[in-house]
Image: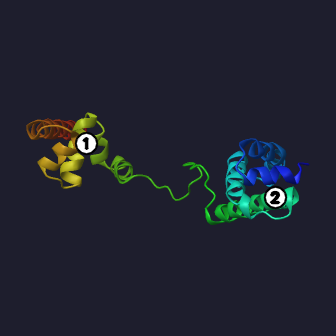
Amino acid sequence: MLSDDVVSAARSGKAEAFSEIYAALAPGVNGYLKVRGLEDHEGAVQEVFLALFSRIGSVRGGFTGLRTLAFSIAHARYVDDVRRRARQPQLSPYDPDADRRAVASAETALLETLGESDIGRHLKELKPDQQEVLLLRVVADLTLEQVAEIMGRSIGSIKQLQRRALLKLKSVVERKEALL
């Protein structure tokens, strides 16, 4: 335990006195805050001593009064931390497998529905980019410009891709009908 003279020396601004007070009280304050469960107990210790040293001129009762004030400030930091945590929701990582709200995308649902029909089976014989352009143009009813922007291509290449897709789809349908 330090003498009351150290508190008087700290009031006069002597740096050694502040160091002695910190060395004497910091381990206890740190232990108190750590046991109370503060996440950043070491940062809180620094805050406690900043507040304590800024009020050193108003301390009464010598070292005992200073010690009481230090733990009062530490307790206030603990209460602030508890209140802060109570206001903040507890975050947990997102697990898509556990999320029962998840539904298939519109595209997946459409392809599954189409997959059960003749058109869907016919579309599956097209290349993926041909399927995409037909779905965007016919099902989504988008303009050539919109499809070009979505697919990152020029309007001319979308026209050509659509033309090839329709010709391929026509040949697939004709071939299937010939087999029936």
Quarter of the image with the C terminus is top left
Q: Position of residue 118 (x, y in %)?
A: 29, 47
Question: What's under tag 1, amino acid-wise?
Answer: Glu
Q: Residues within 10 Å of mark 1 (few under 14, many from 20)?
A: some
What's the residue at 84%, 45% (across, down)? 24
> Considering only order in the chain, which callout, 1 or 2, is on the residue closer to the N terminus?
2
Coordinates of residue 59 in the picture (x, y in percent): 78, 63
Q: Is residue 28 above or below residue 167?
A: below
Picture mark count = 2
Q: Give SS at disc 1.
A: helix
Mark 2 lies on a secondary structure that is helix
| Residue at screen point 17% across, 53% down | 142
Where residue 156 sits: x, y (%)? 8, 38
Q: Quadrant of residue 151?
A: top left
Which residue ends up furthest to the right in the rendered image? 1
Amino acid on which the number 2 mark rests in the picture: Leu
Q: Residue at x 85, y 59 (%)?
A: 62
In three-dimensional space, the C-alpha distance between marks 2 and 1, rounded to whole angstroms, equals: 75 Å
Depth check: give the residue in front, 154 or 110: 154
Closest to the camera, between mark 2 and mark 1, is 2
At label 2, counting other C-alpha atoms closer than 10 Å, the crowd grade (few under 14, some 14-19, many 20 or more) is many
Asked if the residue under mark 1 is in contact with the one under mark 2, i.e. CB atoms within 8 Å, the reply is: no
| Residue occupied by mark 2 | 66
* Most foreground residue, 124 or 24: 24
Query: Which residue was labeled with disc 1?
Result: 132
**Viewer-closest of 56 and 73:** 56
Can see residue 164? yes
Q: From this viewpoint, which residue is outermost toward the left?
A: 156
Residue 33 visible in the displayed image? no
